[in-house]
Image: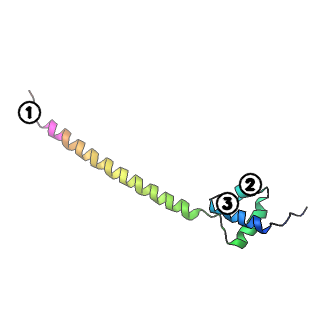
C-alpha cells in the first residue's frame, strides 16, 4: 500500500513542530503518519533530529557544575579542619 504524499501545508507543520523540539516519531504521531514518511520531507527541508551537540553541551555544563561543587566542598573541609586543629591545641581545663 502506497503512502499518501506529504502536502505543502504539512511541510510547514513539520517545520513548526521540529522548531518546537519535537522528535521525528512524535511529529509522525501528531500528523498520523509513519516515521519514514516524516523523514523524507525533513531531509528535503534540511531538518535533522541529531541532538548529539545538545547532549554534549549539557554534559559539559553538568561536569563544570560538579567541579565547582567539589571545589567548594574541599574549601569547606579545609576550613573545618582548621577550626578543629585550633580546638585541638587549645589548653583545656
Residue occupying the point 63% across, 63% down: 19
Q: Are marks 2 and 3 in contact (CB under 8 Å)?
A: yes
Residue 87 within the segment the image draws in magenta: yes
User: What residue did someone put label 3 on?
Assistant: 17
**Lower sequence index among marks 2 and 3:** 3
The residue to which callout 2 is attached is 30
Residue span colored magenta:
85-90
The residue under the point 70% across, 55% down is: 26
Q: Residues within 10 Å of mark 3 (few under 14, many from 20)?
A: some
Q: Nearer the viewer, mark 2 or mark 1?
A: 2
Q: Residues within 10 Å of mark 1 (few under 14, many from 20)?
A: few
Q: Mark 1 — residue?
A: 91
Q: Residues within 10 Å of mark 2 (few under 14, many from 20)?
A: few
Give yes or no for contact between labels 2 and 1 (Cβ–Cβ under 8 Å). Answer: no
Q: Earlier in the sequence, mark 3 or mark 1?
A: 3
Secondary structure at badge 1 equals: loop
Quarter of the rendering occupied by the N terminus = bottom right
Sequence-first disc among 2 and 1: 2
Please tell me whether residue 3 is drawn above or below residue 44 in the rendered image. above
Left or right, residue 69 beside residue 21: left
Where does the image place residue 78, in percent across and percent down from the top left? Answer: 25, 47
What kind of element bears circle 3? Answer: helix
What residue is rendered at 76% in x and 66% in y?
9
**Going by the picture, which residue comes out furthest to the top?**
93
The chief SS type of the magenta part is helix
Measured as percent of width and height from the top left, residue 51 is found at 60, 62
1 lies left or right of 18: right
Corner quadrant of residue 90: top left
Q: Alpha-carbon distance for marks 2 and 3?
A: 9 Å
Instruction: Give the CA distance from mark 3 to mark 1.
Output: 72 Å
Amino acid at each position: 500500500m502506497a503512502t499518501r504524499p506529504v502536502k505543502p501545508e504539512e511541510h510547514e507543520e513539520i517545520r513548526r513542530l521540529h522548531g518546537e523540539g519535537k522528535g521525528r516519531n512524535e511529529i509522525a504521531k501528531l500528523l498520523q503518519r509513519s516515521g519514514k514518511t516524516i523523514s523524507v520531507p525533513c531531509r528535503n527541508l534540511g531538518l535533522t533530529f541529531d541532538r548529539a551537540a545538545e547532549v554534549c553541551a549539557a554534559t559539559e555544563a553538568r561536569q563544570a557544575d560538579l567541579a565547582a561543587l567539589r571545589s567548594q566542598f574541599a574549601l569547606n573541609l579545609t576550613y573545618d579542619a582548621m577550626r578543629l586543629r585550633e580546638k585541638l591545641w587549645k589548653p583545656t581545663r
